[in-house]
Image: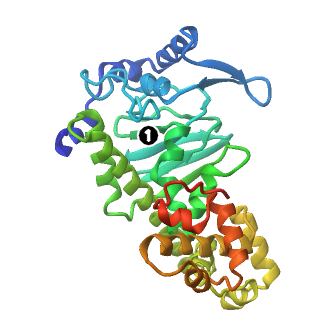
Amino acid sequence: MLAREAFREMLFPLSEKELHYREHPEDSLIYFKNFRYEGEATVVTGADNSDEILFFPSPKKQAASNLHGVISPKIAPRVLEGGNLAFNKQTRFGMVPLHRHNYIEMNYVYSGTCVQEINGQTVEMHTGDVTILDRDVVHRVLPTGENDILLNCLMGQNYFKASFIERLAASGAVPRFLSNALNERNDHDHYLLFHTERSYIFRDLFECVFCEYLDPTTCTAGAVENYMSLIFIELARCYQGNQEHEYHKSNKNYLTEVLQYMDDHCIDCTLESTAAHFGFHPNYLSRMVKEGTGSAFKDLVSDGRLSRAAFLLLTTEAPISQIANQCGYSNQNFFYKKFQVRYGCTPAVYRATGGALAEDIR
């Protein structure tokens, strides 16, 4: 594995391409045109029938577009996990055309600043900021300067579904909210913005996953998977921390605190009791939860109860009837029905197979 000190030393020296683009930024567009001519990318028309938008069909194509001599001559475009995961560093000074793709992209401002156009909006990013772009988001990165280092992680849909982020949904309401935002929307054209500047570990995690990727060795695939798990966990924590920081600044109740309360009290909370706790009218709370998560209050409470039941099935030997009661289900038949709908199997099968046959159906 590449030493992190060596990785840092690779990031800032200008490559030959970047030296050229600094004087002739328009030449960077030639590289993207080559992808179009070689069939590696296609062109679609923008919503107003005027702008041309490049479409990259797989992480490998965009990884190649940014890895040409950027970090080190020995680095060839590579992907992990059967072509579903790739990493790259944004070429500085280059002009990037509007484009979209059918995979998920994470952008991390390692140093300096970055301005992106995302779905027609201008998003200014600073050191420590992260964006996660869902599929079909039309975007581009505006030309960056010498001290602006943008690191990217490209995740194919299959990798994303199989990765730890899918399992985040069982660990709490706030992570579940993030998972739903990326996994369960009918129209995949959304993005999320995170601020990690207060995190003491996020920068280290990103450095480590890049070092594994750039200098693979024994068990690299497993190491990368675990680093990605930690990266998503830390993003979930940063998201909640940022919301709570804003809450304390403005003395308002934010959705994350409501969701956390619901998760902590999912066994016995009701819409009325939760609204009373936060000083809201029940109708207002119901609308806020629905608009913020896309799910009804009662469905989120049910998710919390079922997630807790699934956890107890795997970690205790308590009878299923006892677990159902502990999780707020007095009617055993109703519990079995809801569990079957959620996980695609009975509680007994879920326990016997260690959850391996479950399908988290929402």
Name the spot of residue 52 as percent of width and height, x first: 69, 22
| Mark 1 closeness class: few <14, some 14–19, many ≥20 residues within 10 Å | many
| Residue shown at the point (31%, 63%) measured from the top left | 200
Left or right: 359 with respect to 83? right
* Residue closer to the observer: 40 or 361: 361
Name the spot of residue 191 as percent of width and height, x first: 60, 48
Q: If the image is split into quadrants, where does the N terminus sit?
A: top left
| Residue extending furthest toward the top | 37
Colouring: rainbow
| Residue shown at the point (55%, 13%) measured from the top left | 33
Number of on-image labels? 1
| Residue shown at the point (52%, 75%) measured from the top left | 244
Which residue is disc 1 drawn over? 153
Residue 12 visible somewhere in the drawing: no
Residue 22, compared with residue 249, is above or below; it is above
Disc 1 secondary structure class:
strand
Q: If the image is split into quadrants, where does the C terminus sit?
A: bottom right
Residue 187, compared with residue 254, is above or below; it is above
Name the spot of residue 342 as percent of width and height, x first: 65, 62
Name the spot of residue 181 as percent of width and height, x first: 63, 55
* Residue closer to the observer: 139 or 358: 358
The amino acid pointed to by label 1 is Cys
Quarter holding residue 224: top left
Residue 230, compared with residue 335, is above or below; it is above
Quarter holding residue 120: top right
| Residue shown at the point (44%, 55%) measured from the top left | 232
Left or right: 8 with respect to 49? left
Residue 153 visible somewhere in the drawing: yes
Left or right: 352 with respect to 18? right
